[in-house]
C-alpha cells in the first residue's frame, strides 16, 4: 500500500488513490477514519510560505478531525484552505478551544463521569485547534481548575458541570444527525458550509454535507449514513441524480426531507412532481431564515 506524509499533521500513513483524490487513512487528522485530498493540491500547498503553513495547516487538521469525528466525509483541496481558516466556526480564544474539547468528550460519552481515552495525547492537540501540545495541556489544566474536567493519565471525564456546559452549547441535548445533499457546483458547497450549516446546527441538528457530481462518477456515499439521519435537506441546484436518489431513499425510510433549489434553476428541474415542492431561495441569508423557521 502507498504511504505518504499527511500535509496537515505530518504523519506518514497509508493512502488509497480514488479518482482525482488520495484518501488518507487513520492519521491524526482522522483517527480511525479517513479524509480525501485533491491530488492537484500537493504543489500549491507545499509551495506556501513557511509562516503561512505554520498558521494554517494545524487549523485544517483540526477542522478535518472535528468533522470526521462527526461522521462527515471530507474532501480538501488547496482552494479550501483560506475559507476553512477564516471560517467563523474556527475557535480563536482559549475558552472557545476548551469548549471544543468538552464537545468532543460529550460526543464520546453517555453522561458525566464516563471515561474517554485520548491516546496518544501528543498528537491530539488538534482537538482544540491548538498549534502545539503545550497549548492543549494548558487548556486541559484550565478546564480541570474550572472543575469541568477530570484527568487520570490519558483518561478524561466530564464533571457534572462540564457535561451540563457541553450540553448547553449543543442546544441542551445531543444534536440529531442531519444530511445535507448538494451537487458539486462551484461555490455551492462553500455557501452551505459557511452560511447555512451553522444555522441548521442552532436548531438542534448536526449537519453533514455530502456533495455529488451531475454524473454517477462522484464520491460514493454510504446508505447507512442516510438511514441514521433524522432529517435530509436536498438542494436540487445543479440537478445531481444522486441527490434525487439519496433523498428518495430517505423518503422510503420515512425520514423527513426538505427540498431546496436556487431560484435560477427553479423552473428547469428535471423532475417535476407535486410531492417535490422545494424551497426556492435567492440568497443564503434568505434560505437560512426559512430553514430556521421550519426547523424550530
Image: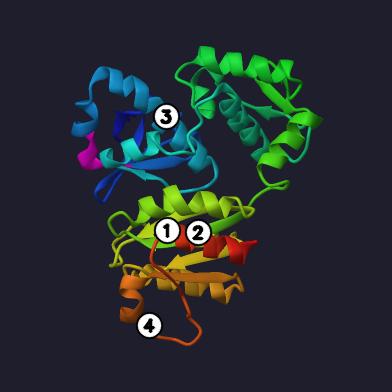
Q: Are marks 1 and 3 in contact (CB under 8 Å)?
A: no
Work out whether mark 3 precedes mark 4 in sequence or the reverse, and give the earlier one. 3
In reply to whether residue 137 is colored magenta, the answer given is no
Work out whether mark 1 precedes mark 3 in sequence or the reverse, and give the earlier one. 3
Alpha carbon separation for disc pair 1 and 2: 6 Å
Q: Position of residue 254 (x, y in %)?
A: 61, 74
The secondary structure type at the circle numbered 1 is helix
Q: Which residue is mark 2?
A: 288
Q: Is residue 256 above or below residue 171?
A: below
Q: Is residue 57 above or below residue 253?
A: above
Q: Which residue is mark 4?
A: 271
Circle 1 or circle 3, nearest the eye: 1
Alpha carbon separation for disc pair 1 and 3: 25 Å
The answer to whether residue 110 is seen in the rendering is yes
Alpha carbon separation for disc pair 3 and 2: 26 Å
Work out whether mark 2 precedes mark 4 in sequence or the reverse, and give the earlier one. 4
Q: Are marks 1 and 2 in contact (CB under 8 Å)?
A: yes
The residue segment tinted magenta is 37-42
Q: Which residue is mark 1?
A: 284
Q: Nearer the viewer, residue 159 or 296?
A: 296
The secondary structure type at the circle numbered 4 is loop
Q: Which residue is mark 3?
A: 59
Amino acid at each position: 500500500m502507498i504511504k505518504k506524509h499527511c500535509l496537515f499533521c505530518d504523519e506518514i500513513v497509508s493512502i488509497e488513490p480514488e479518482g482525482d483524490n488520495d484518501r488518507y487513512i487513520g492519521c491524526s487528522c482522522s483517527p480511525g477514519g479517513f479524509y480525501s485530498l485533491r491530488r492537484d493540491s500537493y504543489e500549491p500547498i507545499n509551495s506556501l510560505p513557511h509562516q503561512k503553513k505554520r498558521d494554517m495547516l494545524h487549523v485544517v487538521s483540526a477542522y478535518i478531525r472535528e468533522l470526521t469525528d462527526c461522521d462527515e466525509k471530507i474532501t480538501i483541496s488547496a482552494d479550501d484552505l483560506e475559507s476553512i481558516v477564516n471560517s467563523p466556526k474556527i475557535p480563536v480564544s482559549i475558552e472557545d478551544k476548551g469548549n471544543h474539547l468538552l464537545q468532543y468528550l460529550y460526543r464520546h460519552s453517555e453522561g458525566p463521569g464516563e471515561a474517554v481515552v485520548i491516546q496518544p495525547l501528543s498528537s491530539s492537540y488538534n482537538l482544540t485547534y491548538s498549534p502545539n501540545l503545550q497549548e492543549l495541556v494548558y487548556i486541559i489544566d484550565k478546564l480541570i481548575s474550572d472543575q469541568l474536567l477530570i484527568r487520570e493519565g490519558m483518561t478524561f471525564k466530564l464533571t457534572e458541570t462540564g457535561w451540563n456546559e457541553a450540553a448547553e452549547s449543543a442546544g441542551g441535548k445531543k444534536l440529531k444527525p442531519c444530511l445535507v445533499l448538494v451537487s458539486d457546483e462551484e461555490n455551492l458547497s462553500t455557501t452551505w458550509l459557511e452560511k447555512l450549516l451553522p444555522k441548521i446546527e442552532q436548531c438542534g441538528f448536526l449537519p453533514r454535507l455530502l456533495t455529488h457530481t451531475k454524473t454517477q462518477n462522484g464520491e460514493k456515499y454510504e446508505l447507512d449514513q442516510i438511514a441514521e439521519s433524522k432529517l435530509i435537506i436536498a438542494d436540487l441546484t445543479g440537478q445531481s441524480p444522486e441527490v434525487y436518489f439519496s433523498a428518495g431513499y430517505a423518503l422510503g425510510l420515512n425520514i423527513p426531507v426538505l427540498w431546496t433549489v436556487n431560484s435560477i434553476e427553479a423552473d428547469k428541474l428535471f423532475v417535476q412532481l407535486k410531492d417535490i415542492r422545494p424551497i426556492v431561495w435567492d440568497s443564503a441569508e434568505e434560505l437560512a431564515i426559512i430553514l430556521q423557521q421550519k426547523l424550530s
